[in-house]
Each structure stands twice: as C-alpha cells, then as structure tokens.
Image (cartoon, helix red, strand yellow):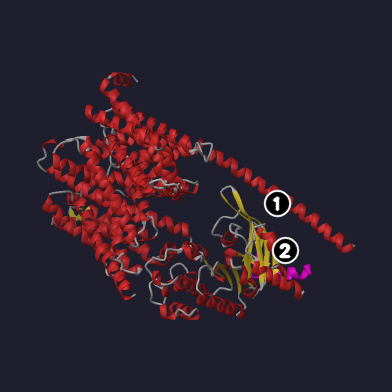
Amino acid sequence: MQSLWTLLNDPNMQWIFISCTLLGLSSGIIGCFSYLRKQSLMGDTLAHAALPGICIAFMLTGTKSLLLFLIGAAAAGIIATFGIGFVTRHSRIKHDAAMGIVLSGFFGLGIVLLTIIQHGSYGNQAGLDKFLFGQAAAMIGSDVLTMSIVSVILIAVCFLLFKQFKLISFDPGFARGIGYPVAFLEQLLMLLMVVAVVVGIQAVGVVLVAALLITPAVSARYWTHRLGAMVVLSGLFGAISGAAGTLISSTAANLPTGPLTVLAATALFFLSILFGPQKGLLAKQFIRLRVKRKLELDQSQLHAKARVAAAETEKGAAL
Amino acid sequence: MTVFWILLTGSLVASCCGILGAFLVLRKMAMIGDAISHSVMPGIVIAFLLSGSRDSMLMLFAAMICGLLAVFLIQTFQQSGIQSDASIGVVFTALFALGVLLVSLFARQVHLDQDAILYGEIAYVHWNVWEVNGVDLGPKAVWLLGVTLVVIVAVIGLFYKQFKLCAFDPALAAACGIPVALFHYLLMGLVSMATVSSFESVGAILVVGLLIIPAATAYLLTDRLGRMIVLSALMGIASTFLGYGAAVVLDASIAGCIVCAAGLLFILAFLFSPSHGYIAKKLRMRKLIETQ
Amino acid sequence: MELKQRSIEAKAPLTIQGLSAAYQKKPVLRNVSFSVEEGELVGVIGPNGAGKSTMMKAALGLIPRLSGEVLVYGKPYKQQRKLVGYVPQRESVDWDFPTNALDVVTMGRYGHLGWFGRPGAKERAIALESLAKVGMADFAGRQISQLSGGQQQRVFLARALAQDASLYFMDEPFAGVDAATEKAIITLLQELKRQGKTVIVVHHDLATVQEYFDSVLLLNVELQAYGPTDEVFTQELLQQTYGGRLAFLDRSRNHSDMLATKG
C-alpha cells in the first residue's frame, strides 16, 4: 500500500495513470458500437494487423514515435479490413475464416519484420517488443501526452456523433433512407476503432488490446437496455480496468500491464454476468421460475376451460 | 540434421493443424480455433509449475482442459444471449491474460519467456532430445507431435462419417442419434491437443495461422471433403518448406515465415484456383455476358 | 368413438402428449397433443411464429422441451429413431460444403450404420435409387452449391428416402421451389403414402392444402384443430388460427364456400 501511494505521488506515474484511464474510457465507448454492430472480433483483427504496420513505420523512419506508428497501423488496419471484405465477397470463404486468415497472416508478417528489426542494425529497437504485451511504465512523456489527447478526441467524436452512430448500429438501411452518409460513418467508426487499438497497444499490447473494446461493452449490456447508459457504463468499466491494470503493474517489476488490465475487465464482467439486473444469471433464474409458474397456471386454466366446455357439450347432448 | 528436424517438426505441426483446420473452417469455427490456441496458455503454465518439466503428459492434459473450458464458456455465454463474436473475445483474452501473467510471475521457474509464447522455438527443437539408456531417439517435440498426429488421424478416421455429418447438418445428425455434443467436444479436444503440441515449436498465436490458412486454401481448390483434408495438410507442409527457406534467407522468425508462406499460398489459390478462384470466376462471368 | 381412438393410439405412428417448448422467456409451443394415423399425409398449418418448426424440432429432441411426451409406434422416440426421417429447412445447412449430391443422400444411411460402420456399395446403391426417385439421378456427381434451390430440396428428399423410415417430418419442403420440384415432391408424397408411410409436412401455401393433404393440423402456439382436411380446413377455424391476419384468404374462402354449398 505504501509503495502504491509513493507511486501515485510520482508525477510521471500520475500522467501514465491518467492516460491509461482515459484510454480505457475511450475504448469502452467505441467498443459499445462495435459490439452492437456485431464486429467485436474486428478489434482483435485490427490489433494483430497493426503489428506489421508499426514495424514498417519503424523500419522506414528509424524512430519510435506514437504518431508515426498510428499512421502505419491505421494503413495496415485499413488494408486488413478491405482484405476481409474482398475475400468474403469474392469467394466461398466465410467471414470468420477470412478474419482468421487476415489476423494470423498479418501477425505472422509482423513477427517476421520484428525479428528482422531485432537481428538487424536498427539502433533504437529496444522497446519495440514491449508492444506485444504492453508496458505502461515504459511510456515516455510525449507518448503519454499523445495517448491522452487522442483518447479525448475519440471520446469527443463519439459524443458529437452519438445519434448517427446509434442509428447506423441499429438500422443502417433506415439511416441511409434519411440521408445519412452511412458508408462514411461506417468507415469513420472503423477508423476510430483502429485509432483506439493503436493507442492502446503500448499500454495493453497487440495480443490483448481487443479485450478493452469487447469486455467492458459486454459487461455494460448486462446492466441496461438503453444505449446511452450502456455507453457510459462501458466507458466507466474500461476506465476502471485501465486504472487498475496500470496501478497493479507498476507495483512490481516484470508485470506487463496488458494482462492485468484485461483481468480487471474480466473481473468486472463476471460481476456483471452474475448480478446484472437485465440478463444476469440471478435475474434470469428468477425470470425462468416465473415463466414456468405462468405456464403451469395457464395449463391448469386450460384444463379448467376444457372441463367447462366438456360439461357444456354434455349438457347440449342431453338437451 | 538440424534442418531435417526443423522441417520434420514443422511438417508434423502442419499436418495436425491442417486436418483439424478443415473441420473448423467448414463449421465456421475459425475464430473458436483462435480462441482455443490462446486459451491453452494457463494450462501449459500451471502444468509447468506442477511438474517442473515442459514435456509431460500432464501438460497435454491440463492444456486440453483449458481449451475445453474455453469452448464451454464461449457456448454458455452465447446461449445466455451474448453475441458469439463477443463471447469468443471475452473468454480468450481473459484466459490468455491469465497465462501471460503466470508466465511473468513465475518466469524463472518455467523457463518460458514471453517471446516463446509468440514465436515458438522451432529453431531449437533438436536441442531437447529424448534419450533412453543413452540412446538418442530424436527431439522430444517430434515424438509429442507424432503421437498427436496418430491420435488425430485415428479419431478422425474412425469417426469420419460422424464428424462429416455433424459439420454439414447437425440437425440431421442429432435426429440420426449421433451424439452431436460429444463429437463437438471431441473435435475441440483434438484442436486443444494439436495447439499444445505445436505450441513449443511455433508459439500460441501462429498455430492459428496453420489451423485456418491451409484449410481455407484447400477449401478453394476442391469440392470433396476427403481431398480437402489431405490438401490442407499438404498446403501446411509446403508452407513449412517455403517458410523455412525464407527464414534462412531473411534471418527472421521461422514460425512467422511459415505463416507468411501459408498466407502467400492462400492468395495464389484465391486468385488462380480453377474452380473457385477470383480470376476464373471473372472469366466465367465475362463469357456469360458475351454469350448473352 | 373414444374407445376406437385409443386403440389407434396404441400403434399410431406418432402420438404427442402435452408438448411445450420455449425460447428464452416466451413459450412458443403450449400443451400440444395429437395422434396421427398410419399412412396419412398431414399438413401443419399456422401463421409465422406459430411454432410449426419448433413442434417438429421439439418432437425430434433437437431443442429441449419444457414438458410433454413423444411416442413413435407406441414407444418413446429415442428407441425408434431409425423409424423416423427428417427433412430440415433448406437454409439450415451450408450448401458450400465440399461434397456432392450422392454423398449427401448417402448421409441418410448413417443412422443405420452404427458407430464404426462405413458407407459401402450397398449404401451407394440405395442412395442412387433414392436420387432416381426424385428425378435427380443425372446430378449424382454434382457439387451441391451448383444445384438450383429446387434441386437441393429434391436432394434433401432423396436423403430422407434413403433413411427408409416409416414416419417422416418435413419442414417446409415446398418453400421457394420451382413447379417441377413441387410436382416431384407431391408425386413422392403419394408414393410414400401408398407404401403405408406417414408424412407430416409444415406447409405455407393455403391454396394447395386441400389438394395435397389428408389431414390438417392447425397450430398457433396451441393446437387449434386437427382432423380430416375437409372437416378442419374451414374458414372459421382458419380465422381462429390466424387471428385477424387472414387477409390473403380469398382463394381459400372460395374453397370453403364451395365446401359449404356442397355440404
């Protein structure tokens, strides 16, 4: 506890803490829309696909800057999205397999490039492998600043375009009908997802960053039926996970931030699945009992009705 | 000799994954395969900690339990109303995170670092040999993979018609009295087993590449299930040879290069397959328009 | 009358008692009971969401039941599986699956092969014969995605024939098929009937009900009516089954008017 307190007094650590919280918040919010659009695993694919983009950006410029990585990863993410769409449209390969092919293919390429960088003469390479599992403590001042600003921008865009995103998640056909630029909005949402994934990579890592998009959104779904509330809750869950992951990871050496953040989010998920008032296990058990009782009641009523009817026909026959 | 062992190991991984991958692709469970390959992590680490060795039967067993647990959790969440994509995502990230955390906490005990999780150590397979009374019997990884391959071929061979019907029409399979759930979990168990056996050589994530990519390539090249399975294994083996060559030239990760080679073969099949390729389809389309 | 009913039930091809099933919160099938006589073609009619497919799936144990009992020739369904053939809706399978028509039909024999048996020459012969019966012998080697919708439906029927069952469940075999297939199916149904087999068909097209079926089962979550077609397929009972939603009944109304004048 003592060490935790001293950590929080360290201004550098405070910044890292704040930026990871913001990251969790923004990912949670965007994750809601990708969950509702049934694209949860797209985040995973984009994260894996980002690796070769980051490596190529590094190989071309030789510098380690988050902004450059963002550009490289976004380009790779867009190629990956396009690839999945192209393969599913033009062959008998289904969406899940296309996603698996692109995900593992890009990741394989990323690993190849990463090993080339490590074996090669790129002086500034130390730390690139931290991208795989995330190490928030390894971030430097400019990274932290970029991450915070980008997260705030993401949150702002979602806030401003809330009703548009809501409609294209629920009924894209109708959105097109009332004149929304649906294709543009869909691409924008995808771009926001890429950005969220890339800024998250340094803190959570390529392999696990998708969890920040998926788990808080699923957890939030258990508490409410309203999108507005769901987005807020999901952001909150994400923020708590990011904060908890960063804090715990900084208490000991050699504890990667990514797994801790994900496990914090998973813990919240389990709480939700148990106690969520909408679809939680306890609530469901309760509803099931009620349906069963209602069915039994109906059936006994039915029997009573049938008896009455039978009695009446008998009466009719007697007459 | 080193090259021989590396290629043999790679080919065995490719065969195990290729056979099972065909069923995963046909059952639209590619991402479940991905989830299993991530989820076996905690099982592997726990078995390491318990047995103190990295090639025990305990490891196979523990990892299989973890894989099946992941499948079970995914299905339970799906049935409780979570979208299938999201339930896959929640489960595998949680289990993988647990595995990575355990590795980080007990790194010294398990002789396993985070890199090995990602790349595997196929280049070093020949260092870890199995010796009986001083006789060198070859790398342990080859034995492990060989046993896995025999099990897979035996189970799939014996119950081929059940696996086929469960993949094509589970409703009819159930109506015929085939225990669909049993065969589902049997397949998932085999996938977990293949993942664990391959883990040491190619790492947890690139296994997915060998499970899905060669099977998808084969799917574009043939219209018979039997041929698809054989072709899928062959595509994986071809990727191993191509990838190893590329890795030597580029001085890069062998496992990464193998998956890239598999990806390349897929792109070739996607473009040039005579029956289902992009170009063949476009040509047929043009002919159709011209004749009209 | 009641005594006779009971003696039939003892060896009736299908007896369903108090069958209920639910998805999530809502019961979609409530307390359905009926018994089918041997050699009958039964049409199951009802609006969308009335639980027609659900009834079949629950009877076959493909979805869990809340309550109820299913007897096939007087014994529980599980002991009589080989006597039951099932034709699922066409959309229920992936037609891109790498296999050909003959192979799909051979799958109909899997239930008879036991755990380790493999399909051999005998199964192949049965499958080819079944394909010929639905007029698809020339397409035996064709990849299934290259068949038209009607041809795919006929392959499914051939597969059911290969099952060599005594009681068949067919889930909307007439949905979206061409005229040739419709004719092939109805010829086949008549042939099955002649062999003394019992067929239960989920059906949508009210205009052809009187032509195709001996008995009609009207279903809307609960059993509305069941009996010989000319007794049950009346405007009154249809109105009751479909609620107020029966705007498209013009043709059927003419039919029932005709019935009324005949009566």
Quadrant of the drawing holding the N terminus of chain A:
top left
Q: Which residue is mark 1?
A: A299
**Residue A48: horizontal and vertical position, in percent?**
28, 45
**Label 2 environment density (alpha carbons within 10 Å; few <14, some 14–19, many ≥20):** few
Decide which of C81, C36 is in the foreground and name it.
C36
- Image x and y of residue C42, in percent: 63, 70
The residue where tag 2 is placed is: C236
SS at circle 1: helix
Q: Chain of mark 1?
A: A
Quick check: marks 1 and 2 in contact, CB under 8 Å? no
Q: Amino acid at mark 2?
A: Glu
Q: Which residues make up the magenta segment?
A: C1-15
Asked if residue C2 is among those painted magenta in the image, a careful observer would answer yes
Indicate the quadrant where residue A268 lies. Answer: top left
Measuring from the top left, give residue C226's x and y in whole percent.
69, 66
* Residue under the image location 47 percent in, 57 percent down: B181
